[in-house]
Image (cartoon, rainbow, N blue to C red):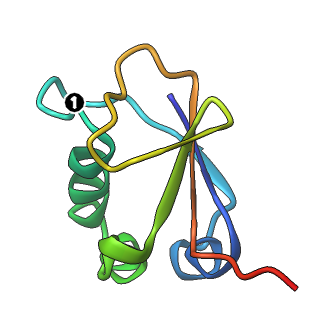
């Protein structure tokens, strides 16, 4: 599965995207963020406040409880403001 990181998430993790094989216990976006936060110190720093991080599965905005099964890509980004 392809993971894409935007804005300060990208800066904290140090890569714009990565390919991962998810373990079976990762079923939702929330599970994925928890799993990612355990991968490295950089990931832990990026996902330390998961409540504000937004996600999109295959370019559709989703809630943390959204299932990740069958997703081609998941993007993570901080909250955005309009202007």
- Residue at position x 32%, y 71% in the image: 50
Q: Quadrant of the rendered structure where residue 56 is? A: top right
Q: Which of the pair 55/34 is nearer the observer?
A: 55
Q: Give the residue furthest to the front.
A: 83
Q: Which residue is nearer to you in this view: 74 or 51?
A: 51
For the point 68% across and 76% down, the residue is 80
Q: Quadrant of the C terminus?
A: bottom right
Q: Label 1's element?
A: loop
Q: Residue 14: percent from the left, percent from the top?
A: 60, 73
Question: With 1 as the anchor, is 77 left or right in this view?
Answer: right
Residue at the farthest top position? 70
For mark 1, what is the residue? 27
Instruction: Please tell me in which quadrant of the rendered image residue 25 appears.
Output: top left
Q: Can you give x and y, in whole percent of width and height, for residue 8 in the image? A: 62, 82
Q: Position of residue 81 (x, y in %)?
A: 72, 82
Instruction: Give the residue drawn at x 27%, y 66%.
Output: 37
């Amino acid at each position: 599965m392809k993971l894409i990181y935007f804005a300060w998430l990208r800066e904290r993790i140090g890569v714009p995207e990565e390919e991962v094989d998810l373990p079976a216990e990762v079923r939702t976006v929330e599970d994925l963020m928890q799993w990612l936060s355990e991968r490295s110190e950089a990931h832990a720093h990026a996902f330390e406040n998961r409540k504000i991080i937004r996600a999109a599965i295959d370019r559709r905005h989703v809630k943390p409880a959204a299932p990740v099964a069958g997703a081609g890509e998941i993007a993570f980004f901080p909250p955005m403001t309009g202007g």
